[in-house]
Amino acid sequence: DGGITQSPKYLFRKEGQNVTLSCEQNLNHDAMYWYRQDPGQGLRLIYYSQIVNDFQKGDIAEGYSVSREKKESFPLTVTSAQKNPTAFYLCASSIGWDRVAQHFGDGTRLSIL
Amino acid sequence: GQQVMQIPQYQHVQEGEDFTTYCNSSTTLSNIQWYKQRPGGHPVFLIQLVKSGEVKKQKRLTFQFGEAKKNSSLHITATQTTDVGTYFCAVPNAGGTSYGKLTFGQGTILTVHP
């Protein structure tokens, strides 16, 4: 089955700790994205990557970092600089980047201990 | 960056009633997409509209793109409990380093009372 796998499903972060959220896709999509969703709100773009070894900041990149070393993988690190990390994090991918649907993973819920 | 206003934020209906959500942009759009997110789930792509005045139907769902390509609507006829969820519109950022980005509306949360 082709799809996007996010792990873990739930994650707890201690103060001052960096955590990494995994996103893997086997759809052979070029573009990948990370969004943050807060309760009752829309999706806000954190980072996106249109091609391997390249990525761009989204609207709320501060306190986050990413890498794109492989086409199928786009991990997101939530650093200690992100003071309000509690949210639902969604990874998505698309076959291109213009007028194409984005396909989402099941998400990771991050909470602060 | 691109901005899009989606209304209403919430809609409660009785099963069988109709439902409509609207997205409005201050700028002309090249296209608009609609997604549905079930409670506890992830957004799922529903449709993309590209042409001025375009109307597309998926069973009980009707999607429209305004003549000026600045607004769009999603209408559900005779809602069912399976329609529960949040409906988002998403519009592209065009040009430069923003190419490929989507801006999502805040979403309309639909609840359906049986």
Image: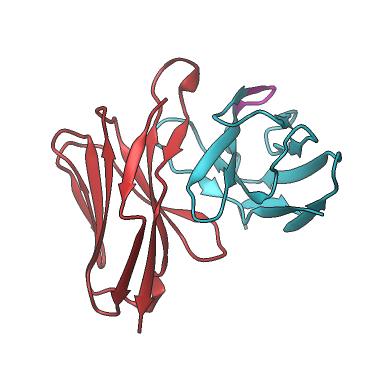
Chain colours: A cyan, B red
Give x and y (percent) for residue A41: 49, 50
- Quarter-of-image position of residue B78: bottom left
- Quarter-of-image position of residue B30: top left
Asked whether B44 or A16 is in front, the reply is A16
Which residue is situated farthest in the top direction here? Answer: B96
Residue sitting at 22 percent across and 52 percent down? B56
Query: Is residue A18 found left or right of A44 in the rendered image?
Result: right
Residue sitting at 68 percent across and 53 percent down? A108
Give x and y (percent) for residue B41: 55, 62
Asked whether A27 or B43 is in front, the reply is B43
Is residue A26 shown above or below B13? above
Instruction: Give the residues in magenta.
Output: A50-55
Magenta part, dominant SS: strand
Residue sitting at 47 percent across and 30 percent down? B101
Give x and y (percent) for residue A105: 61, 52
Placement of the C terminus of chain B among the 4 image quadrants: bottom left
- Quarter-of-image position of residue B36: bottom left
Residue sitting at 33 percent across and 41 percent down? B5
Placement of the N terminus of chain B among the 4 image quadrants: top left
> Is residue B106 one of those drawn in magenta?
no
Give x and y (percent) for residue A81: 76, 32
Which residue is situated farthest in the bottom direction here? Answer: B114
Is residue B97 shown above or below A86? above
Q: In the rendered picture of this protein, how many numbered marks are placed on residues?
A: 0
Asked whether A45 or B54 is in front, the reply is A45
